[in-house]
Amino acid sequence: MSGSVYKIVELVGSSSTSWEEAAKNAVENAGKALKDLRIAEITQMDMKIEDGKVTAYRAKVNLSFKYQSSN
């Protein structure tokens, strides 16, 4: 009986407009290099502040994808 195995990586995406856009940037950029993306879980959100103003939104994302063995 065979099953699937998934690997989880942690990414940080950023955006000047929103946390949603930051998470989307992380997933879409990872999708250019990783195949069979499955689940993205936002684990943390924060903001970059300069001179008292928010300049960037950041989203930490755990992203799972299907593990492909070399066999």
Image: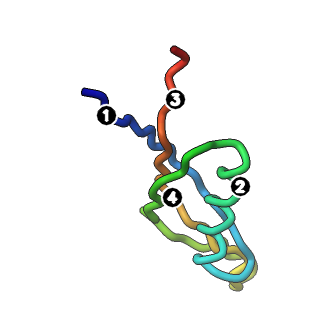
- Give the secondary structure at mark 2: helix
Q: Nearer the viewer, mark 2 or mark 1?
A: 1
Amino acid type, callout 2? Asn
Q: In the image, which disc is placed on residue 27?
A: none
Labelled pair 2, 1 in contact (Cβ < 8 Å): no
Three-letter amino acid code at the position of disc 4: Val
Mark 2 or mark 1, which has the lower sequence index? 1
Marks 4 and 3 sit apart, C-alpha to C-alpha, by 21 Å
- Label 1 to label 3, Cα distance in Å? 12 Å
Q: Split into 4 quadrants, where in the image is the N terminus?
A: top left
Discs 2, 4 touching: Cβ within 8 Å? no
Q: Which mark is residue 3?
A: 1
Q: Position of residue 66 (x, y in %)?
A: 48, 40
For residue 49, above or below residue 35: below
Q: Give the residue type at disc 3.
A: Gln
Locate residue 58 relative to residue 6 in the image: left or right.
Answer: right
Q: Give the residue furthest to the top.
A: 71
Which one is earlier in the sequence, the residue at label 4 or at label 1?
Answer: 1
